[in-house]
Amino acid sequence: MSITAHKPASAAPSRPATERSVHAPTLGRMVLEATVRHRGPALRVMRDGRLVQWSYADLGAQVRELARGLVAIGVAPGDRVAILASTRPEWTISDCATLCAGATAVPIYQTNSPEECRYVLAHSGARVVICEDADQVAKVRSVLDGCPQLEHIVTIDPVDGEPSLADIRALAGDVPEGALEAAQLQVGHDDVATIVYTSGTTGPPKGCMLTHASWLATLDMYERRLELGDDVVIFLFLPLAHALARITQLLTVDIGGTLAFWSGNPAHLLGDIARAQPTHVPSVPRVFEKIHTKATAAVQDAGGVRRRLFDWAMVVGRRAREAERAGGASPPLRVAHALADRLVLSKVRGLFGGRIELALTGAAPIGREVLEFFDACGVLVVEGYGMTETCAAATLNTPDAFRFGSVGRALPGTDVAVAPDGEILMRGPHVFKGYYRDDEATQEALAPDGWLRSGDLGAVDADGFVHITGRKKDLIITSSGKNITPSNLESALRESRWVSQAVVFGDRRPYLVALLTLDAEEAPALAAELGIAPDVAAMARDDRVHAALAEHVDAVNARFARIEQIKRFAILTRDLSQAAGELTPTLKVKRAIIYERYRHDFDAQYA
């Protein structure tokens, strides 16, 4: 296999490697040192209308107490401690305490079914599971017979009959203060810090063994590429069982920034972002698409002068951003931009709280139009790329070096290459150790020379920017032999205000078809526009709704080659969901499940 590796461009700006990341031997040691070194707020969240905040001193005290409490109940270096909870400050405290006790953290998605929880607990051999509340405890209790190594259930919120985090922290006095330092001496740089189970778009999840060395190398990569100070406020709502949220958490602690957590209510997510006033927001495309919809929906409904003003402001915003990057805007453009910003553009920034410096999106494609819209408003949303197997790191666009439509250049220390069949390959110190208890899958993913086979298809342009075109396993081969990757087409279909999810189908068929779902939040506006009842199930069967979506499908088709166009589509009577097993916790479609579950809906479009 002939491969040319693409290294980070030397012209790309980077800050010096941070001493803390280079020299900290383990993540536990990094956390212990960071909580002593830093001042100011570490974690904050709004609860019942009240701001709850932990300083770095508070974080350090609680982490040390909980870590010693874990030691008191018998947790030893290398033991697995699972965390089954939603994204909240106590997740971070539990994770840091596990690492400081020298144990291996095993995150579990809070949306997992009892059987999925059983699989992770049993496969990892977890001795302790930290559950969020009574509902999560009930899941674990229902599958205890299948978890022979599980000895302790600990809760975040108080649950009758189970010890809480506060109870475990109270045991700290039974353990010498030097116990954590002794535990860290038993943990090596190349030992496994965490086993992160993939979200499983196909088949059962695999446990990625990520070492302390890999995580620390990843921290160094991001810190060298991004300009981050201790005044950074990062909004966190992504599930912490996911590698991107996890590296965000560790990075923030390492640099002394503030993690601003969401309230936990999906209906309040956009309001939570605005109230948190973050400087940085890592997210998945669907959230930025929803913010885009919120920013444009009212204007579309109003029409008339308001719509023309909005369109004018967007044109001025784009021209001003282009001029600024080219060396400076002309005086007339600066005046026009100041007016456009006061009347329109600043209001879009206000949806992010008004202090946003950079937003990062990953895990799935996002429409270029969405990125350009936010950029015109003064919010730079850039794409990055990585996998669980690379600690969520590989490539990244930055404010000083970005290209819309790409996932950026290779991070420092990362090699990116393209195999002859178009598969993206990666190599570097951030690459995982292998899949836990699965040598066959490890050998399939890791080449003998260290290259990780990503399963993603793509290319690298002359300037080193990586472009992802789709998944090898998602490739659609039509009956005429044409190869089509559906992800970009699906992303374009989701740009409609009315569309929540889109799944394209057509393997071994003469043309492509799609299943669309209606956005429940926007459906009432569409119903009012069409003069029909705002019932999503009934709307899905209404010819007038189909005609409205057909206009959008036609517009999307115009952007793609004829062979890639959607010839027919159907509308489902409900949205896809995690609860139904159709979406991963990061909102990626489980394509194989959708194809099987809705086969009749797809087949009917070929009748």
Image: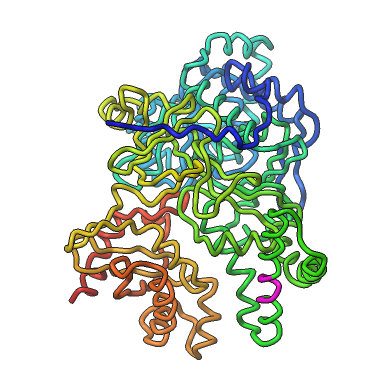
Tell me where the magenta segment starts and ends, as one range.
Answer: 311-315
Rendered location of residue 256, percent (x, y): 73, 32
The quarter of the displayed image where residue 273 is located? bottom right
Image colouring: rainbow
At x 78% / y 71%, what residue is drawn? 336
* Residue 33 lies in the magenta stretch: no
Rendered location of residue 226, percent (x, y): 65, 37
Relative to 316, is 301 above or below?
A: below
Q: How many marks?
A: 0
Relative to 142, is 27 above or below?
A: above
At x 43% / y 38%, what residue is drawn? 140
The quarter of the displayed image where residue 513 is located? bottom left
Rendered location of residue 344, percent (x, y): 74, 71
Q: Is residue 172 left or right of residue 241?
A: right
Q: Main secondary structure of the magenta part?
A: helix
Q: Is residue 256 left or right of residue 579?
A: right
Relative to 336, is 71 above or below?
A: above
**Quick check: can you spot residue 152?**
no
Rendered location of residue 498, percent (x, y): 49, 74
Q: Nearer the viewer, residue 464 or 179?
A: 464
The quarter of the rendered structure image containing the C terminus is bottom left
Relative to 301, is 327 above or below?
A: above
The quarter of the rendered structure image containing the N terminus is top left
At x 29% / y 74%, what residue is drawn? 567
